Image (cartoon, rainbow, N blue to C red):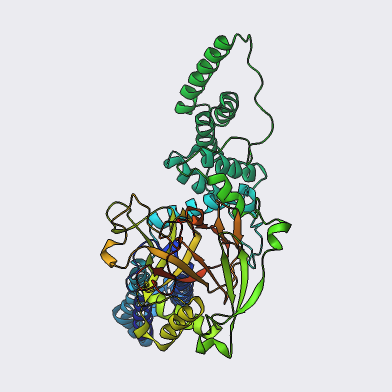
């Protein structure tokens, strides 16, 4: 029990302050791996105790079975021996009581106590829904069909992972409950496909067909909805809702045919439902298609002419003394607006120290409400972040100084170093880093003006996905561990450069760690003087 207490205390420390939205940070989810391992060990100890207990009871029963056969064949003769009489009294008075205590002792107490203590740090229903939606987001962004996920066919994966029929059904049900019939169809169809291939499941085929047929109807495909409902009724003729749905679907189809002047119904499409069978519904993001195509590496406007204007150089930060002997390697990522990448800006040791400092404080990343200036969480930003001050550790102070040296901008009025870790399907949809004219309250409380520039450290490689993309001019920048990218959000006049609207693509495979520094206008007056025109 001492080991159990230590284990529980350690896990409580690891999860201190983490109660929800676990899916938004892969870094914090790694703790769950070790928690699950400890629970498995606890479960194995419980099984071993149960088996030991059962073996003891079994041996006792076998011994007494032989004895009672002899004693019951001639009770008086058996008890004529005084030792037998004594041992009978002893067994019934002492040994059976000990056996009773053994049977009543429940070795599950330790396991139940362990899992009960851990449960408060388990992912909740919100996490499960968030993780399911993340898979659907990846499915949409990277044009992956449900079978790719179900069979684990993802680029860059090191470990095989499969989705069962029940997993696919639960995915479809999550979408269905959110009135997302597009994804419900895709996942229910995958569940049905695996069932038809002979895979066993707790979910019945009738359940899958029930959800699938109605979702297909909601997608506007009446012939296929009718076909699926008839298939459901052939499996379960007494299914009341299916019978009513079939009559309703047939009436709707007849009405449609009459209005179109057709005499008879065309047969349902025999092709199986797959990605592209139905059009994905439009949403709130106008540049969704451009953004997602850039995430896939499509539509990048890197022409040979533009490429000829990109160079690499050694950057000494306007002859900064700290960079004269060891200048920073700088590469052009884009010509206009100018985006540069600095190489070897963070060592592996610095990266690990930053992650170590940030991890206990990671909390759901926020965005600033444009109307009130208050920080709030948003569904379009799926990550966790922490803010680190220079005084906390020499590494943070050193990194801040390096950022100031290479950019030649003052960090005195910059925001703290923000560290972010992206979770399952982690992303930050297209957004501006600076505040627009209709957002006067955005940075008012800081008193340092608008965000003039962004400096972004990549602290991990990402196996697939996770690029930084700029939909306006078609750039896609891939994460490379130990490098950083830098761009200006404002023209020298102070006007916002609307071309810098950018996004962090969903992480398909891997764990993405970044840290960034946002520079503000105040303090840069002599480091980046105003231009003569609005767009200098």
Residue 179 visible, this orientation: yes
For image coordinates 51% across by 89% down, the residue present is: 322
Q: Tell whether 395 sits left or right of 221.
A: left
The x and y percentages for residue 290 are: 58, 47
In this view of the protein, which residue sits in the foreground, 396 or 185? Answer: 396
Residue furthest front in the image = 532
The x and y percentages for residue 316 are: 56, 82
- The N terminus: image quadrant: bottom left
Quadrant in which residue 224 is drawn? top right
In this view of the protein, which residue sits in the foreground, 74 or 536? Answer: 536
Vertical position of residue 19 compared to residue 93: above or below: above
In this view of the protein, which residue sits in the foreground, 200 or 468? Answer: 468
Residue 63 visible, this orientation: no
In this view of the protein, which residue sits in the foreground, 145 or 384? Answer: 384
The x and y percentages for residue 452 are: 42, 65
For image coordinates 40% across by 60% down, the residue present is: 494
Vertical position of residue 404 compared to residue 493: above or below: below
Vertical position of residue 23 compared to residue 289: above or below: below
């Amino acid at each position: 029990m001492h080991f159990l207490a230590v284990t529980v205390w350690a896990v409580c420390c690891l999860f201190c302050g983490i109660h929800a939205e676990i899916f938004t940070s892969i870094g914090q989810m790694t703790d769950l791996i070790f928690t699950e391992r400890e629970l498995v060990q606890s479960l194995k100890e419980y099984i071993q105790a149960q088996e030991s207990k059962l073996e003891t009871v079994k041996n006792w029963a076998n011994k007494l079975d032989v004895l009672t056969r002899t004693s019951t064949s001639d009770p008086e003769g058996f008890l004529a021996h005084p030792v037998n009489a004594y041992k009978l009294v002893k067994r019934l008075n002492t040994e059976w009581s000990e056996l009773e205590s053994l049977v009543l002792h429940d070795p599950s107490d330790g396991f139940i106590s362990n899992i009960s203590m851990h449960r408060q740090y388990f992912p909740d229903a919100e996490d499960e829904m968030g993780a399911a939606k993340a898979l659907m987001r990846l499915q949409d962004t990277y044009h992956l069909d449900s079978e790719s996920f179900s069979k684990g066919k993802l680029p860059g994966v090191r470990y095989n992972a499969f989705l069962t029929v029940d997993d696919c059904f639960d995915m479809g049900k999550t979408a269905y409950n959110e009135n997302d019939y597009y994804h419900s169809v895709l996942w229910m169809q995958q569940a049905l496909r695996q069932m038809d291939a002979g895979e066993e499941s707790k979910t019945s085929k009738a359940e899958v067909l029930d959800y699938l047929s109605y979702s297909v109807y909601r997608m506007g495909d009446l012939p296929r909805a009718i076909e699926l409902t008839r298939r459901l009724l052939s499996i379960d003729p007494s299914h009341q809702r299916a019978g009513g749905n079939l009559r309703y679907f047939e009436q709707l189809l007849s009405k449609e045919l009459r209005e179109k002047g057709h005499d008879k119904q065309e047969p349902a499409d025999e092709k199986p439902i797959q990605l592209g069978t139905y059009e994905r519904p439009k949403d709130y993001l106008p540049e969704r298609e451009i953004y997602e195509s850039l995430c896939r590496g499509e539509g990048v406007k890197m022409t040979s002419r533009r490429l000829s204007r990109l160079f690499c150089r050694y950057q000494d930060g306007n002859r900064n003394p700290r960079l004269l002997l060891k200048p920073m390697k700088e590469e052009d990522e884009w010509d206009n607006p100018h985006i540069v990448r600095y190489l070897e800006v963070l060592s592996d040791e610095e990266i690990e120290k930053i992650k170590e400092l940030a991890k206990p404080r990671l909390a759901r990343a926020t965005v600033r409400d444009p109307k009130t200036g208050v920080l709030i969480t948003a569904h379009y930003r799926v990550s966790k972040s922490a803010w680190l001050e220079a005084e906390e550790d020499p590494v943070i102070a050193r990194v801040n100084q390096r950022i100031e040296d290479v950019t030649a901008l003052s960090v005195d009025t910059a925001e703290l170093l923000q560290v972010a870790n992206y979770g399952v399907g982690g992303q930050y949809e297209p957004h501006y880093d600076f505040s627009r004219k209709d957002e006067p309250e955005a940075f008012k409380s800081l008193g340092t003006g608008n965000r003039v520039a962004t400096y972004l450290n990549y602290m991990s490689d990402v196996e697939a996905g996770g690029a930084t993309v700029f939909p306006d001019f078609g750039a896609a920048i891939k994460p490379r561990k130990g490098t950083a990218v830098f761009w200006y959000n404002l023209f020298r006049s102070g006007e916002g450069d609307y071309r810098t609207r950018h996004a962090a693509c969903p992480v398909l495979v891997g764990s993405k760690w970044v840290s960034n520094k946002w520079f503000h206008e105040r303090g840069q007056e002599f480091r980046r003087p105003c231009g003569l025109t609005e767009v200098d």
